[in-house]
Amino acid sequence: MIIYAFMCHDIVANVSLLQQCYLENDHTTMFYAAKALMTLQALYGVIPNLYGKGECAAVCMHYMIQNRIKVCSYNADEMT
């Protein structure tokens, strides 16, 4: 869980990230966080339990689910 602690520290320390996410409703950073987590899962296997708290965590999870659907549908099309 070192990655989780590192990410939490970065999110709390970066005030502009919180401003983008909550005040400006810009979720670009959450998209990149989701892509980073998906890359980790591609390298080391699926993370069995992901926990988050708040709107930004829900948005990040949404992006991960959408990305997983895209990857699975792409792989299914490639197999046929």
Image (tube, rainbow, N blue to C red):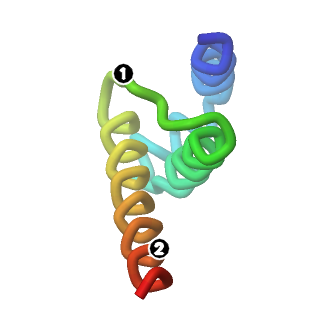
**Which quadrant of the view contains residue 37?**
top right
Q: Residue at x 62, y 29 (%)?
A: 15
Of the two numbered discs 2 and 1 in the rendering, the one whose residue sits closer to the viewer: 2
Amino acid tagged 2: Asn
Q: Quarter of the image for the N terminus: give it.
A: top right
Q: Residue at x 57, y 40 (%)?
A: 41
Amino acid tagged 1: Tyr
Look at mark 1 in the image and give the residue it sits on: 51
Q: Earlier in the sequence, mark 2 or mark 1?
A: 1
Q: Disc count in the image?
A: 2
In the rendered view, tell whether residue 40 sits above or below residue 13.
below
Residue 61, percent from left and from top: 36, 43
Q: Residues within 10 Å of mark 2 (few under 14, many from 20)?
A: few
Q: On the picture, is 29 further left or further right than 67? A: right
Residue 76, percent from left and from top: 39, 76
Residue 33, percent from left and from top: 58, 44
Q: Secondary structure at mark 2?
A: helix
Residue 13, percent from left and from top: 67, 20
Query: Nearest the camera: 32 or 74?
Result: 74
Q: Quarter of the image for the C terminus: give it.
A: bottom left
Query: Nearest the camera: 7 or 78?
Result: 78
Q: Residue at x 37, y 74 (%)?
A: 73
Look at mark 2 in the image and give the residue it sits on: 75
